[in-house]
Structures are given as C-alpha cells and as structure tokens.
Image (tube, rainbow, N blue to C red):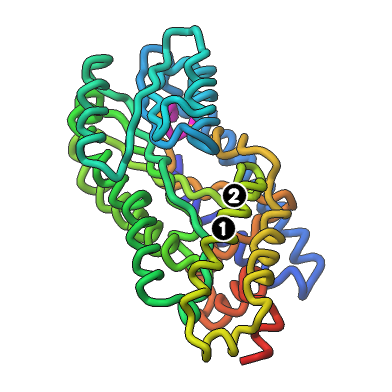
Amino acid sequence: MLDEAAIYQVGLLISVLSSVYAALQPCVLLAVLCLAIGYICFTALQRKRVRSLTAYGRTVLITGCDTGIGYGLAQRLLLEGFTVIATCLDVEGPGARELKKNRSGRVHVIRLDVTSDDSVELCFERTRKICKGTDGVLNDARSFTYENEYAVTPLSSYLLRVERVVDVNLLGVIRVTKAFLPLVRYTQGRIVNVTSVKGLCAYPCFGAYNISKYGAEGLTDTLRLEMKGFGVKVIAVEPGNFGGATALWDESNTERLRREMADMTSGATDEALTTYGDDYLDQMLSMFKEGNTYSRSNIDPLLDDFVDALTNQSPAYRYATHGGSTLLDIDVLLTVWKNYLPTSLLDYLVLKYRGIPARMKEGR
C-alpha cells in the first residue's frame, strides 16, 4: 500500500500536468482527467481499507469554537460520537450558548484565551478533571485580517498588526499544544493544527496572516518529527477558499475591516497616498469580496478531513482542502504548483488571481 505522502505527490503531479498540457492537446486533457479520476478512486479505496478508530469514548479539545470552523467542527464531532471540550473566548456568546444546549452529556464548554498563559493553564486544569487524557487537540483559534499593502501602511501599525495576529495564530498554538502535550501523550493521540494554504503560498496584502501561518506550518512539521517517538500524530489541515462559508463577509465584519484599513491608511505618507490613489481602500475591499464569491457555501469537506484526521489509523500528514465553488480551487492549486513552477510564473499567477487591482498596477 502506498503511503499518504506518495499518494499526495501523485496528485500534485497530475495537477501540474493538467495545467501545463491541457491547453495544448485535447487528448492530453482527456488522459489527465482519466488519471485524476483513477487517483480519486484509488485514494477512496485506500482510505476504506484503513481501519477507522471509533469515536465513542474518545475526547478531543477544540480551540476557537465561538464561530466558524471551530463551532462547526464541535457540532460535527458530537454527531460522530466524540466527547468534545469546546473552548470559546466568550462562553456567553451565541456559539457557546448553542453548544451548551446539547444534551448528550458529551460537550464541555470552557473559556480559553489562547493569548493568555493563565487562561491556558486554567483550561488545562479544568480539562484534566474531565479526562485523564485527550485523544486530540485541534488548534483552530485564529485571527484573520486583510491589510493594506506593506508600502502604504505605517511601520508602527504594521508591526502592531503582525504582533496581534501572530499572538493568536502561532504563539496561541504553541501555548495550547505545550500545555496539553502530557494529556495527548497519555493517549498517544493527535495534534491537528489548522494552518492555511496561505502558510505555503504567500498573497499580497496578507502579510501578518502569511507570517503567522508560515510559522504554524513550520511548528507542525517540527512537532510531527519530535512526537513520532511517542506515537503522537501531528497533522496540518490547510483550508482553501472557505471565506464564503463563514461569517467573514457579513455586514459587521465588512465594516470592521473597512475601519481597520482606513486607520492604517490614515497614517500613510503623502507620497504613498498619491501613488495608490484616493479610491485605494474601496478597490481593495471589492477585490477581497470578489475572491470569496468563488467559495463554497459550506465547510462540509473541511469537516470530513478533520474526522479523517482523528479516526483514520493512517491519516495524511496534511490535508489541503478544496474550498472553491467551481471545479478547481485556485488557492489550493497555487499551493500545489509552488513546488514545480518557476517563481516568476508562480508570481504571475498569484497576482493574476489574488493580486492588486489593475488600476493600481497601471499607476506605478
């Protein structure tokens, strides 16, 4: 049986071949499609042949259950039969209140601020009273932000933004994982870190987020090697374009992003404002919103990968989860192509699909 890494590489190769040759020969496209279908079927059969672990009697801790992926994951794992320790920043918020309504007796809602050592320690002590060991720790709590470009953002504002995002997305993962390692080692369980395709392929105007997710990828790879001797599996889940499936672009979030970007722009130099133009902010927000129109309307594929990561006896090391509403998720494909394409060509594709507005490019 091929291991998951080999199967993953075959998938990457097929994706690259399809992108390079499809436009040249229709017969090549047909051949690649047949190979892709065969690959999907083979992978499905391989997973079915791997005996799954039962969910019942197993306990997992999830960070960031207030909203979005963390909340949806808590609900899904409860349906699967897991006992869930759902940590929320606000235990009186809408997400926490909904989770508390579950009458199975298998959900425990605990407050956790991943940026606070004291909060992490208190959460650990409460968890240890619930169970001797955790079969999984899922680090999903994250801070997501769009930004103005590096050149237009004042240094103090940029550094503050990086510190805030890294404190949640990277240092928060370090704090929680470090605290709960004894409980995970006890069960020879799993650590699942929600990183991002943006932790493998950088996008403009996502500087702080890219930095934090690149760091989380490096941390995950390091832990995977260090934990092998303890029988603990460390896994990265790398969501693609799921922005439209969450509350990312609801009215309150859109207004918050507008205020934050306006605050950053307010401190820009006259030279930067002249270079980027008066309508820079509106163009950036429109570009971001347009990118999410190609997102899935739900996170079901992502939840399926989480379940597989927790129950498959031989899970993948990383799950780059397709989130697009079309046949291909450009965010995942760019991550795949990064390993094979020249940097200049990759840069062209990133800027074409996730780059700066056209008028701004012309004005430089």
Residue bearing mark 1: 257
Q: Answer with the quarter of the image where residue 165 lies.
A: bottom left
What kind of element bears circle 2? helix
Residue bearing mark 2: 253
Callouts 1 and 2 close, C-beta under 8 Å: yes
Q: Is residue 360 left or right of residue 172?
A: right
What kind of element bears circle 1? helix
What residue is drawn where x is 43% and y is 45%? Answer: 194
Q: Amino acid at mark 1?
A: Leu
Q: What is the distance, in whole Å, between disc 1 and disc 2 at their CAs?
A: 6 Å
Q: Toward the viewer: 290 or 163?
A: 163
Magenta region, mostly helix, strand or loop? helix
Residue 163 spot, x, y in % from top left: 33, 60
Magenta stretch containing residue 309, yes or no? yes
Q: Residues within 10 Å of mark 2 (few under 14, many from 20)?
A: few
Q: Toward the viewer: 70 or 90?
A: 90
Q: Residues within 10 Å of mark 1 (few under 14, many from 20)?
A: some
What residue is drawn where x is 47% and y is 25%? Answer: 96
Q: Quadrant of the image for the N terminus?
A: top left
